Amino acid sequence: MELFNVYPLNDITPVRALGAQLWDDKGKQYLDFYGGHAVISIGHSHPHYVQRITEQVQKIGFYSNSVHIPIQRELAEKLGEVSDYPDYTLFLCNSGAEANENALKLASFHTGKSHVIAFKGAFHGRTSGAVAATDNPKIVAPFNAGHPITFLPYDLGEVERVLQEGNTCGVIIEPIQGVGGIIMPSDEFLQGLEQLCQQYGAVLIADEVQSGFGRSGRFFAHQHAGVRPDIISVAKGMGNGFPIGGILISPEFKASYGLLGTTFGGNHLACAAALAVLEVIEQENLLEHAAQMGEYLKTELLAHSGAQEVRGRGLMVGIKYDFPIKDVRDKLLTEHHIFVGNASDPTVLRLLPPLNIKRAEVDQFLQALYAIIPAEVRR
Ligand SMILES: Cc1ncc(COP(=O)(O)O)c(C=O)c1O
């Protein structure tokens, strides 16, 4: 059987990885400055992570949510403590899209409304059709009734105008847009949005799938703005490569049997992976390290890269040029053996290295970029 061919591939076959380094099947070494779309948070094959997963699978790898799974509680407790949300509850699933679907469903159940506000350039996943196609009144929320979405600019007046119509269940926002090209709403915008959601009874959902788990130098990117969303969705860096996602839910939401559900979500192995990530983040002080490395990277880029703009927080960085970056990205990979990402804006390079990236590795990336960008651009 052939694979359904939907991904353009680089002609590289990684077979081994450690930290921010990858090796292909020909023994060629690469620097990973992208982590497979922000998934690699604590570095590839971190010894503590490998040990935690190995020990878990030797005991039990999976059983469904019909029995007690103590490691789920262990994970919820640790996540509450490390993220500073000890009073929230945790629902576990398998991916970012699934986390957002559950967040929207919950918002819809909670308010009895269906309309959603999102923002221009946003990316929240590809599977919302799955909810829309379900015809079981016990499972579906009002959200299913066509789940109308309005995409707005970062304009509080526009948001209020739509909220005043009275049919909005939730507002979903990436505190830093990833796929959109590392675009940040201002802290004041997020604060105003929180206030409007409270005023009009809409659920504020922070999509931290890409920006969460330490990527921005705080545990969650919205914490830079001092806001407290009602629901926070997580995935990607949460499992460092093991598929896991979830939503953190404010105490205002009451759980009831059957409200949400999943087969694989919160399985033993996924929880072991996520716990290992949190333990490493804590033990290795990775929030502070990510903030410091991010500052260093951005300062250097602003001074020497010739970029029009350097955006982002911590180790979620976008470099915007006034020309398409495809050639730069290709050269970084083929000539300098460095993985970086692109964005829906073709003039933006997206950097998402592991949170424990070393300064020497940052320098390696910078030197490679400077060698590619023509001197007249860098002047
Ligand atoms: C902000 C954000 N939300 C949701 C998703 C979807 O996550 P997944 O691909 O795990 O479904 C992504 C993926 O890139 C994302 O960046």
Image (cartoon, rainbow, N blue to C red):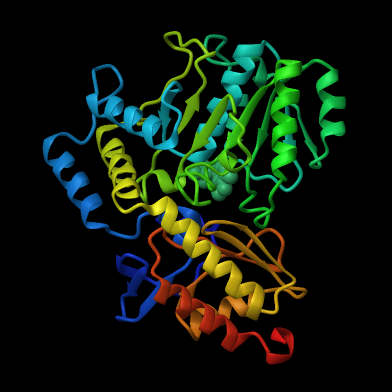
Task: Look at the picture and state if 213 lies above or below 228.
Answer: below
Q: In the image, what residue occupies the spot 52% across and 62% down?
A: 294
Task: Name the quadrant containing residue 60.
Answer: top left
Left or right of 237 on screen, residue 211: right
In the picture, the quarter occupied by the C terminus is bottom right
Does residue 128 appear in this view? no
Vertical position of residue 245 compared to residue 49: above or below: above
- Please identify the quadrant where the N terminus is shown: bottom left
Q: Nearer the viewer, residue 31 or 252?
A: 252
Question: How many discs mark residues in the rendered view?
Answer: 0
The residue lying furthest to the left in this view is 58
**As drawn, is 16 to the left or to the right of 208?**
left
Pick the front one: 87 or 212: 87
Q: Residue at x 44, y 32 (%)?
A: 84
Task: Give x and y (percent) for residue 161.
Answer: 87, 26
**Ligand 1 quadrant?**
top right
Q: Is residue 120 above or below residue 321?
A: above
Q: Please identify the quarter of the rendering in which residue 47 is found.
A: bottom left
Q: Residue at x 48, y 38 (%)?
A: 234
- Residue at the (47%, 43%) spot, across then down: 219
